Amino acid sequence: MTAQPEAAPIGTPAATLTEPSAAATASCSFCGKPDAQVAKLVAGAGVYICNECVALAASIIDGSPGPSGAPKPVWAALSDEEMLGHIPRVASHIDQAEADLRAWVQELRRRGVTWLRIGESLGVTRQSAWERFSGEE
């Protein structure tokens, strides 16, 4: 049975989160495992986290050692071909985060927040924010 992404966490404006495209398979943003390989996958603002990474994070927060000490990078045990196969999933996370960011900015603009304030929040000029998110050429 394929695990389905759960609802957005409390406090996250669910209406502004965008769903992954049908072509993109949801996968954990931390370990990279696709939803079919984990029991649960929780969706956040542009990210997913699996039950295994939640358990590891909880053990780190609690101060207990993880299953094998310091975690190794995801790619440490992957062949070149496996890494190449993983790149599209990484790119889909970037695309999802960008789509979510656009939705948040659109909502801020709908509420009348100025480009200056949006730019300041992002650490860019109002002009850069406008050029990136206004949708105008």
Image (cartoon, rainbow, N blue to C red):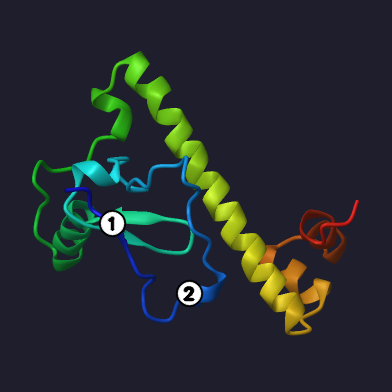
Instruction: Estimate how packed mark 2 is, as few (under 14), some (14 to 19) or many (20 or more) residues with alpha carbons within 10 Å.
Output: few
Could you say where residue 103 lies in the image, as x and y percent from the top left?
63, 66
Circle 1 sits in a helix, a strand or a loop, which is it?
loop
Give the mark, 2 or 1, whose residue is nearer the N terminus.
Answer: 1
Disc 2 designates what residue? 14
Q: Are marks 2 and 1 in contact (CB under 8 Å)?
A: no
Circle 2 sits in a helix, a strand or a loop, which is it?
helix
Left or right side of 97 for 58: left
Could you say where residue 67 lies in the image, as x and y percent from the top left?
8, 46
Q: Nearer the viewer, residue 2 or 69?
A: 2
Q: Nearer the viewer, residue 113 or 21?
A: 21
Q: Mark 2 against mark 1, which lies toward the viewer?
A: 1
Left or right side of 121 for 43: left
Placement of 13 over or under 37, stated as above or below: below
Placement of 70 over or under 128, stated as above or below: above
Residue 4, which numbered label? 1
Cα gap from disc 2 to disc 1, whole angstroms: 16 Å
Q: Quadrant of residue 42?
A: bottom left
Left or right side of 92 for 26: left
Left or right side of 97 for 65: left
Q: Nearer the viewer, residue 71 or 104?
A: 104
Identity, as a three-letter code, of the amino acid under mark 1? Gln
Q: How many marks?
A: 2
**Residue at x-position 84% and y-position 55%:** 131
Could you say where residue 44 lies in the image, as x and y percent from the top left?
41, 64
Placement of 33 over or under 124, stated as above or below: above
**Residue at x-position 46% and y-position 46%:** 22
Instruction: Estimate how packed mark 1 is, as few (under 14), some (14 to 19) or many (20 or more) residues with alpha carbons within 10 Å.
Output: some
Q: Quadrant of residue 40?
A: bottom left
Identity, as a three-letter code, of the amino acid under mark 2? Ala
**Residue at x-position 60% and y-position 56%:** 99
